[in-house]
Amino acid sequence: MGKKLLIHNDKVPGINTLEVYRIHGGYSSVEKALKTMTPDQVTDEVKKSGLRGRGGAGFPTGLKWSFLAKPEGVERYLVCNADESEPGTFKDRYLMEKIPHALIEGMITSSFALGAKTSYIYIRGEYFYVARILEIALAEAYAAGWLGKNILGTNFSHDCFIQVGAGAYICGEETALLESLEGKRGNPRIKPPFPAVAGLWGCPTVVNNVETIAAVCPIINMGGEEYAKIGIGKSTGTKLISASGHINKPGVYEIELGLPVEEFIYSEHYCSGIRNGKKLKAVVAGGSSVPILPTELILKTAKGEPRLMSYESLSDGGFQTGTMLGSGGFIVMDEDTSIVKNLFTFTRFYHHESCGQCSPCREGTGWMEKILQKFLNGTAIESDVELLWDIQSKIEGKTICPLGEAAAWPVAAAIRHFKQEFLDIAKNKKFIDISHYNRLNKIVA
Amino acid sequence: MKVTIDGIQIEVPKGTTILQAARMIGPEVAPPAMCYYSSLKTSGGYCRTCIVKVTQGSSANPSPIPKPVASCRTEVMDGMVVENNINAELLEARKGVVEFLLINHPLDCPVCDQAGECKLQDLGYGHGSAATRFEFKRREYEAIDIGDKIKLHMNRCILCYRCVKVAEQITDNRVHGVISRGDSSEISTYIENIIDNDFSGNVIDVCPVGALTDKTFRFKQRVWFTKPVDAHRNCDKCSGKTRVWLKGEEVVRVTARKDQWDEVEEFICNSCRYDYKKTSDWVIEGPSPIHRNSVISQNHYQHLNELKLQALKQQNALGFMPLDKKP
């Protein structure tokens, strides 16, 4: 078992209350930062730690913070992206639900480093009950003087607000999130300008994932250099992985980056193997938008080295033979899984969630879903596979925001690694039962 | 700032976008644009037809931008090198965008008032393919009236957001916008509010397709049977400079004047557009400049006979024989 820094206390009764959280060393990073450090020193520690964004893109957090424009007399904002909507990802929910104060503590420390007087937690509409938990925790923090004016008797004052979204996947994209936070339609903005220059209400803004912000607390407590020793290479620290699918023990696991994928799937400390003694067929390693990999490529890289749970190792081989760590939504599929049916589910989701601003994504996602529907109906022909490939290649990289890519990559990877399955269906005109989807469709309509 | 587009270098001021720079060079390198509109702020970036490949970011940072960029929203950097028509990969990508714009378009050009001056027709002709690969039912909406002068055919809309920007920036207050999400997005008025505003008619002019049409002109005439002339009148609301479309002596419609990129020069008010439909209301300045390749200029060539002669010479040189001369 590796080191745990974020959810090591998750089983402690009452850890969601300030009192118990404080007994277990809570808010010590706020004390340390505000009393003994300058904002720049905090940023330096985060830089030294090598912490990378946990939301999916894996951009170095310290670097992102240092890009923040700091003009005189202009407000700066920290926004926490709690719009965790990537299918297969539920780590932030677990963290916020069990230890809400970990996020609030991280928000205060990070805001101190950035010089933000106000911060927002944008939480997805479906997590309404989690927002309630956070609000209670926030009230506790205000009452105890961790938030508000002159925190701990220093000059630093800070306010934190929670905003509940209306349940749109696209609002997890940082600029769409900012639009939504401003009360507008959640459409991604055209970049540049980046949020670090002109974000919320035109002011410099940093948008970070829940887990990233929570990870700032252990970094300040133990020191950036010490944190950097955990993990492997440029993938430092620990990561929450949401394991789901055909495994014996689904759930949220905190791992040290660099854990072999094979150990993660089969070790009894983690997923404990495939359920019902079946064989592994494929894994989506980082949330539904990252490329799916078949067994031989997920356990070992193309070079034959064991694949590790780290940013570098998972993306080894590019998209030809690799994938991405993404948001850590680890979806395991056993030998009975139909990749085509699974791809239909993903594509249907992206079609439904496309914002409709730019044409390739608006029209292309729906088109791909319709073609995949043909495969499920048993009416597909072999050339449909080529057409599908062509459509995804014309969406990828042509859109305003990464939703286009998120919709295109799963299609590309499924065809790249499981083309025969598509061709077999087209040849045999096999019908795949999707009656439960039709029921869903009716509900949606 | 120096920028090179398709091998042609041009010096432009700071803050110029790639599209504007390309337009300065000329139509042969300018990428097509369906949603960008020079007189509307924050327009552009949605349709993705104007994408170009940046092979050198700037002279300070010569690395290329990996993905194609929307030229209408990307400012040039000093020493930037851009490829548009000379990059085959890019043209293929643009073909894809055109295909996406067309898969849910009804292709009802024979009954569409915009036919002949439709940007989507031009785009499809210039950059699309001859056949469609889309075999499913297209998206359908009922045509609705927005206001007593404007008809909205959502079927034909490509969601360029131009009309939304007009309402935001030209008229007093916006009562229409985009509702729903993804491919069910549609332009709609807010709870049956009608567009009732002195400058609302401009949404018709900016619409690149036949989604927003003038109800006073609908089904009256095909545009290529009408003759556009520039005219003006004294107006206290707008400049009064308009383009009047004549059929014989009759004024069939009035629109704003458009430049060579088919973009409105000066927005006009609704009284000029709808209320003055007699030739005597207008001071006619002369024929409007219409591009020679446009269907509107058919039969309006000034040197028609010369052109015919030229074509005949070319045919003779190639050994063609005119149909009526064939034995």
Image (cartoon, coloured by chain):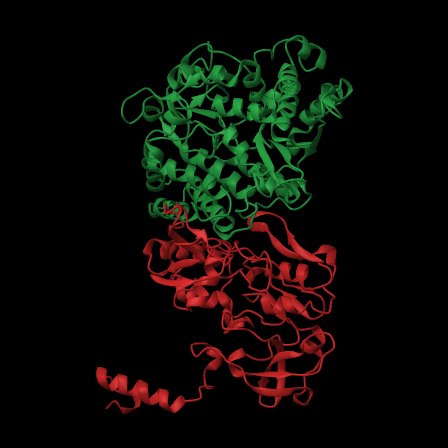
Q: Nearer the viewer, residue A222 or A211?
A: A222
Q: Is residue A146 visible?
A: no
Q: Any idea which chain is the green one in this picture?
A: A
For the residue pair B135 and B232, the one nearer the viewer reads as B232
Q: Is residue A182 above or below residue A220?
A: below
Where is residue A147 drawn, in percent x and y? 73, 23
State whether residue B67 appears in this view.
Answer: yes
Q: Is residue A75 left or right of residue A430?
A: right
Image point 31% across, 25% down: which residue?
A: A301
Q: Which chain is red?
A: B
Front-most of residues A77 and B97 = A77
In the image, residue B267 above or below residue B1: below
Q: Is residue A338 left or right of residue B323?
A: right
Q: Which of the 4 image quadrants contains residue B40?
A: bottom right
Q: Quadrant of the N terminus of chain B?
A: bottom left
Please state the horizontal and vertical placement of residue A77, each as a whole percent of the image.
64, 35
Looking at the image, is B244 positioned above or below residue A97?
below
Left or right: residue A149 compared with residue B159:
right
